Image (tube, rainbow, N blue to C red):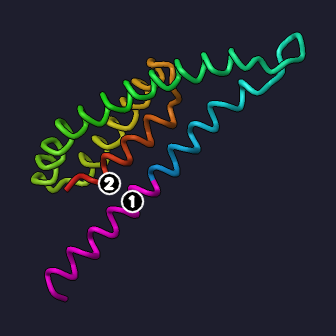
Amino acid sequence: MHRCTSKVISGMINVQKLADCLQDLAVVVLLMLIPLLAPSDSGALGLSKIAKALGLAAVKAVVAIVTIIAGGRVLLRPLYRRIAALENTEIFAATTLLVVLGTSVMTQIAGLSLALGAFLVSILLCFCD
């Protein structure tokens, strides 16, 4: 296969990964809305309550996502290069588990779900060398 062809295919795969990630993030937003759709004591949905909660959740999510992605890009690539140089699969698996659990706990502390943290790490690990 020619180099140009392989670069085009690689670019298409990266675009597909990005599209999949955006779809998953859209599902996360919808899952955050479900509890807000329950009727309040007065029986109304409370549009202002939903708007406030969405705004706060959006700010938290953006700050957490940007922090995790920026930190992950800076820290994960050198870390995994060193671990790959060791050629020890047990250390590789243990480090991956620790990174996933740590990021999940960080998102939980930020008021977001554990699953969002695991999802963000999976995105970061997909783009590691």
Q: Quadrant of residue 99?
A: top left
Residue type pointed to by label 2: Cys
Residues drawn in magenta: 1-20
Considering the numbered disc 1 on the image, is that residue within a helix, a strand or a loop? Answer: helix
* Image quarter of the C terminus: bottom left
For this rendering, which residue is in front, 96 or 47?
47
Q: Which residue is mark 1?
A: 17
Residue at 32% from the left image edge and 31% from the top image edge: 66
Is residue 9 magenta-colored? yes
In this view, the mark in front (1 or 2) = 1
Residue at 67% from the left image edge and 21% from the top image edge: 50
Residue at 30% from the left image edge and 36% from the top image edge: 69
Residue at 25% from the left image edge and 48% from the top image edge: 92
Question: In the rendered structure, are the residues bearing label 1 and label 2 in contact, judged by CB atoms less than 8 Å apart?
Answer: yes
- What secondary structure is the stretch in magenta mostly built from? helix
For this rendering, which residue is in front, 105 or 74?
74
40 relative position to 92: left or right = right
Q: Position of residue 68 (x, y in %)?
A: 32, 32
Q: Position of residue 31 (x, y in %)?
A: 64, 36
